Image (cartoon, coloured by chain):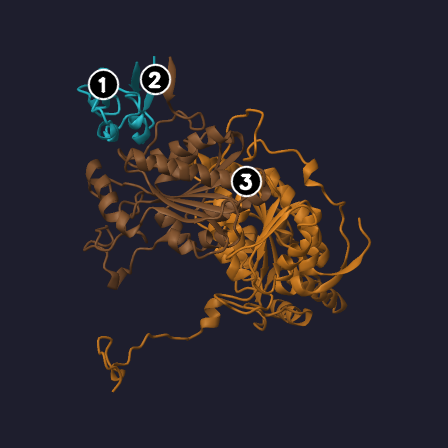
Chain colours: A orange, B cyan, C brown
Amino acid sequence: MTEKTLRKGNEALAEGAIRAGARFFAGYPITPQNEVPEYMSAYMAEAGGAFVQAESEVAAINMVYGAASTGTRSMTSSSSPGISLKQEGITYLASADLPCLIVNVMRGGPGLGSISGSQGDYFQATRGGGNGDYHVIVLAPNSVEELGNFPKLGFELAEKYRMPCMILADGILGQMMESMSFHFDPIDPNKLGKFDWAVDIHKNGRKKNNVFSYKGDNLIADVVERAKRYGYIEKTEARWEEREAENCDVLLVAYGLSSRACLEAVNKAKEEGLKVGLFRPITLWPFPSKRLAELAAKAKAVLSVEQSLGQLVQDIKLAVNGKTPVYLNAYPAGGQPDGHSILTAVHSILNGGREGLFDLQEHAGDFAYECKRDTSLGMQGDLKGGK
Amino acid sequence: MPRIEVDANKCKACYLCVNACPKKCLGKSDTISKKGYFPAEMKHPENCIGCAMCYMMCPDIAITVIKD
Amino acid sequence: MTIIAKKPASLTDLPMHYCPGCGHGIVHRLMGETFDELKIADRVIGVAPVGCAVFADSYFACDMVQGAHGRGPAIATGIKRSKPEAIVFSYQGDGDLASIGMAEIVHAAVRSENITVIFINNAIYGMTGGQMAPTTLVGQVATTAPKGRDPKLQGWPINMCEMLAQITGAKYLERVAVDSPQHVMQAKKAIKKAFENQVNGVGFSMVEVLSQCPTNWYASVPQALEFVRTKMMPQYPLGVFKDEGGK
C-alpha cells in the first residue's frame, strides 16, 4: 500500500492501470476522460508498453482487440458517445473471449449530450451494449481511490473469465481530486505466465493459435457454453457495499458518485431519527441481486438514486421482484444528486408525497402529442417551397 | 522427366492451369470428383517440361510438380 | 525424385472454400511461399478480414486473428505494437479496405506502422453477393448498381495505391495482378518485398492485387481474366507507386 497522495480521478485510474500491468493503451480524445490518454502518452512507454492515439474510437478498440489477442494487458478509455462507437469492438472482444479493460467516464446523453458527469450508460454497460448475447463485467468505483485500484481487479477478472471488463466511472469522478493510495505493488507483466490461447511468436513448434470471433462450426453451442461462465460469474463475483442497510425503513440503492450523495442522506436521516440505509452495487454486472433481495425484504421501500432516467431501477425491480415497493429518484443528463434532494424523496415515500419521485406515466400526465405537417408551407415535392 | 500430380479432392475445375500450360498438356478429366467437379488432369505427360505454370495459376494449390 | 513446386509448408492442408477460379487462393499461396522462403513462419501473425477471406485463418499455418470489417490495420497495429518482433499482416478486400476501413488503412499508413497489408481488389463485394464496391468500375453492373455504376449517383472508383502514395508514412505500394503466370510471378516479388520490408523495419507496405471474381462478375473463368486485363488494368494500372524500402 502506497502513502496517500492527492490525485485526479482520471490520473489515478491511468497510474493504477500501469501499476496493474497494462502495457497497451489506445484511445481517442473525448471530454471528460482526456487525462487518461494524456497520462498514458507520458508514462506508458516508460513502463515498457505502447500508447497509440488512434484515428477514432472504433480503431482504438480494435487496436485493443489486436493487443489483447497477444495476451498483453490492454485497455482503452473513452466517454459515452465514444463508448457507443466502441461497441463493435466490444462485442468482437466478447465473442473472441479476449480479456481487456474498457473505461467509460460517463457524460450526459443521448447523442452529443453534455460533458457533465452522468450515469446514462447503465443499460449499455450492463446489457452488453453491442450485438448478440454477451456480457462484460462492470465495475463501478465511487472514489478516486477505487478508480486507482480497480484496474488491477478489472484485469484479473477479465483474464480469469476471458472477457472484457468495464470500469464505469463518470465525469465528476474522473475530474475530481482526492487523497488516495494504491493497495498493491506494481505488477511486472513479464513475470506473469503466458496464455495458451494467445497469438505470439512460437519457436517451440506449438500448434497454431487462432483468435476467432466466429468459430465457424457451432455458434449456438459457443454462446450457450459462454453463458455457463456468465452464470458462474453471477453466482460468485457480485460485489457490493452496505451502510445501515439491515433493518432500515427506506433502502437507498445507488452506485458510483451518487452513492456518495446517498451517504450524506443516510447521515441526515439519522439526525432526523429516520431509518435509511444504503446498498451500493460495486459490480453492476453481475448485479448483486441476491443480497439486495434479502435486504429489500426487510425494508418498507427501496429507492433507486441514479443519474439516469429509470435504468438502475429496472435491475432493482428485477431483484426485489415485486415484494417491496421500488421508487425512483432520478438525475438524468448531467444532473447531480445531493443529500437534501435525496432526503426529500425519502420524505415523500414515508409521507405519501410525490416530490422527488419520478414515474414515467405520471410524468406524461395528460400530455398529448401529434405530428403535424403544414401544407401552407408548400408540399414536399414542391421545388419552390413556401408561399 | 517432369510430371504433375493433381489432387482431385482440392481441384474445383476452374481450369486456370489448363489455360496456363504453354505445352497444352492438361485437360478436363472424364471422372467426376467427390466435390462434384471434373478435375483437371494430365493428358499429354510426354509434353510436360516442368515449368510449373499450372502450379502457379492454381488457386486451390491442388498441383504438385515433380521431376523424377 | 525432386519436387519442383508444391504447397508451401506455411499453409495448412485444408481445402479452400473459395469459388472456382478465384484469385484469393493464388495470393494465399504466394504469401505461404514468402513465409517459407524468408523463414519467418514461426513469427508471422495474420489478421483475417470480414469478406470472402473470413476463413483465411484456417488456411495459414501461422497464428491468426479474425477481426471486424475494415479494422484489420487497427488490429494489426495492436498486435505489432505489443509484439514488435512478430511479422504482422492484414489481409483485406476492397470493401473492407477502401470503404468501411478507409480510416484504419489511411492512418496505419500515416503512422507508418511496420506491417504488411495485402489488399485484394476484385471491384465487387464477393461474400455478400456482388454489391457495388468502392472499386467497382464505371458502368460495371452490381446487385446494388443494377444499371451499372453511374458516376452521377455513385461516384468514381477509388485508386488506393495512388491515394496512399501521397502519405509520407506509406513506404512501399505496388499494384499487381494474378491473371497470368507472368503477373503471378511479379505479384510474388511484390509480396515478398512487402514482407522483407517489415523484417527490415522499413514501415508501412501494401500490395494491391487485382483479382478475378468469376462468380459475382457472372463470368466464365477466361472471361474474368479478360475483364481483369481489359477493364480493370486501364483503371488500375499495374506498377510500383512508392518504394522507399532502401531509404
Q: Are marks 1 and 3 in contact (CB under 8 Å)?
A: no
Which residue is the site of mark 3?
A: C200
What amino acid is at disc 3?
A: Asn
Which residue is the site of mark 2?
A: B66
Label 1 resides on the chain identified as B
What amino acid is at disc 2?
A: Ile
Q: Residue at x 71, y 41 (%)?
A: A188
Of residues A378 and B24, which is closer to you in this image?
B24
Of residues A126 and A64, which is closer to you in this image?
A64
Kind of element beneath mark 2: strand
Kind of element beneath mark 1: helix
Which residue is the site of mark 1?
A: B47
Give residue A28's position: percent from left, percent from top. Answer: 55, 58
Image-quadrant location for residue C221: top left
Of residues C69 and A244, which is closer to you in this image?
C69
Q: Is residue A279 left or right of residue B46?
A: right
**Which of the marked residues, 1 or 2, is nearer the chain's N terminus?**
1
Image-quadrant location for residue A218: top left
Give residue C6's position: percent from left, percent from top. Answer: 37, 23
Image-quadrant location for residue B25: top left
Q: Residues within 10 Å of mark 1 (few under 14, many from 20)?
A: some
- Identify the mark at residue C63; answer none if there is no mark: none
Of residues C247 and A364, which is closer to you in this image?
C247
What amino acid is at disc 1?
A: Asn
Label 2 resides on the chain identified as B
> Is any part of residue A190 visible from this angle?
yes
Q: Residues within 10 Å of mark 3 (few under 14, many from 20)?
A: few
